[in-house]
Image: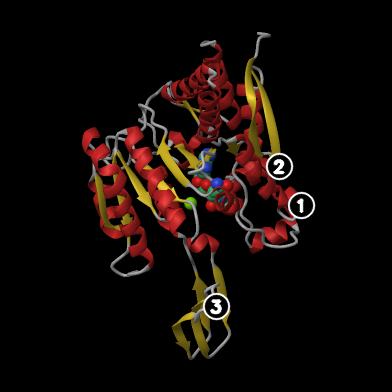
Amino acid sequence: MSDKIRVTTPIVEIDGDEMTRIMWQMVKEKLLLPYMDINAEYYDLGLKKRDETDDQVTVDAAHAIMKYGVGVKCATITPNAARVDEYGLKKQWSSPNGTIRGILDGTVFRAPILVNNIHPFVRTWKKPIHIGRHAYGDVYKNQEIKVPGPGTGELVFTPRDGSEPIRKVIQEFETPGILQGIHNTVPSIRSFAVSCFTYALDQKIDLWFSTKDTISKTYDAEFRKIFDEEYEANWKEKFDDAGIEYFFTLIDDAVARIMKSEGGMLWACKNYDGDVMSDMLASANGSLAMMTSVLVSPHGYFEYEAAHGTVQKHYYKHLEGEPTSTNSMALIFAWTGCLKKRAELDETPNVADFAKKVEEASIETVESGVMPGDLMKVADPDPKNRQVSTEEFIDAIKDNLEKKL
Ligand code: NAP
Ligand code: MG
């Protein structure tokens, strides 16, 4: 095969860490580069490189997505104290995803990859539950103080027009303690709402939104108010015509209802709720490695990634020379999602067609019983099921892909 499929516009390729970095290389070498001519604009967000560049490389990667529109990202380590020691870091760099989301704004949508031999743990779930995570602000862009002893913790806003600051006492401390300040902005919440209504209408699914506005009467209440306004002003008619609903409820009630629902809705969550609930949904659908993730910016930028992290434990096994059986499905779907979006924007149907074949080959591989260890634990029992190694799984997908070309 000499005629490779050309991807005309550069793809912003963001490499990462540990086991996902190993799989990233395999996916590219085995499933993509033999068949495609990809003009990649490569950013190495491996932790070493972030440390060497004082994290500039992360900012550059985000700006490249702003330039070209579409990127694909490998999982990256968010350093904690242990990582600072392990990698001898200059400092505890911020979460790369947080940095990129801070620059691009937007909403992260996640949906499970469904295969016919794995059923969700929640028996009532018949359809995929999509989750939309607000990807800006809150605890991900906070300031924190470790309170050393007695004193006053305050929240202060200083207007730029020179008028009186607004102050509120958070706590009169009599003992050591902790303090946290978080924020969000009206434009970001509004674009979150717009992204969610757009996605739900596009997919023809109900939109559920949840906050804790009974407790957080200003902060969370503002989210609810903006969603309500946006719905009434711009979406009610369209939703009625499409036969779908917008439904607001408290976060705890939403969790309770989701567990008893049939699925098939977009669940819009604030940043932290989305972080936690998307991992719960992913694992209830079989494995974290069966969850796709895309950051949709209101400015028209898209970043595709896997929902899981760098799979550190498997990487340490790999370093010990032990065989691993790590699941590359979500990484593969990050690449195909990115290629399909690129194809849509470039109007190159042959690129989309190839991406679809890679997805089909991946799904058929699992459905044929060839799967990594995480799926063996959750797939319908079948004598033909066979656990394969990280690399064998990708090779098996390649065999199935070859049959389609
Ligand atoms: P993780 O990498 O998602 O892995 C947690 C566990 O989930 C694994 O130990 C494994 O379970 C299972 N798992 C996840 N992905 C899998 C896959 N592809 N195939 C098979 N099993 C999989 O989360 P973590 O261990 O908490 O975090 C590791 C690092 O990832 C951290 O440094 C964190 O900062 C980073 N992280 C990055 C992102 C991102 O870049 N988007 C997101 C989350 C975390 P078993 O060990 O039981 O097999
Ligand atoms: Mg999470």
| Disc 2 secondary structure class | strand
Q: Report which quarter residue 64 is drawn in.
A: top right
Residue 281 visible in image: no
| Disc 3 secondary structure class | loop
Quadrant showing the C terminus? top right
Is 281 placed left or right of 100 in the picture? left
Q: First in sequence, mark 2 or 3: give its number.
A: 2
Q: For mark 3, what is the residue?
A: 162
Residue closer to the observer: 385 or 250 = 250
- The amino acid sitting under disc 3 is Gly
Instruction: Check whether the beta carbons of the residues at disc 2 and disc 3 lie within 8 A of each other.
Output: no
Q: Is mark 2 within 8 Å of ligand 1?
A: no
Q: For mark 1, what is the residue?
A: 53
- Which residue is the extreme one toward the right? 52
Q: How many marks?
A: 3
Q: In the rendering, which numbered label is found on residue 373?
A: none
- The amino acid sitting under disc 2 is Asp
Is 9 placed left or right of 290 in the picture? right
Q: Is mark 3 within 8 Å of ligand 2?
A: no
> How far across and how far down the image is residue 21, in percent?
65, 39
| Disc 1 secondary structure class | loop
Q: Residue at x 31, y 65 (%)?
A: 213
Q: First in sequence, mark 1 or 3: give its number.
A: 1
Q: Residue at x 36, y 32 (%)?
A: 118
Disc 2 crowd rating (10 Å Cα; few below 14, some 14-19, many 20+) is: some
Disc 3 crowd rating (10 Å Cα; few below 14, some 14-19, many 20+) is: few
Q: Residue at x 61, y 28 (%)?
A: 27
- The amino acid sitting under disc 1 is Thr
Residue 299 vs 2, above or below: the answer is below
Is 153 placed left or right of 202 in the picture? right
The image's colour scheme reads secondary structure
Q: In the rendering, which numbered label is found on residue 44?
A: 2
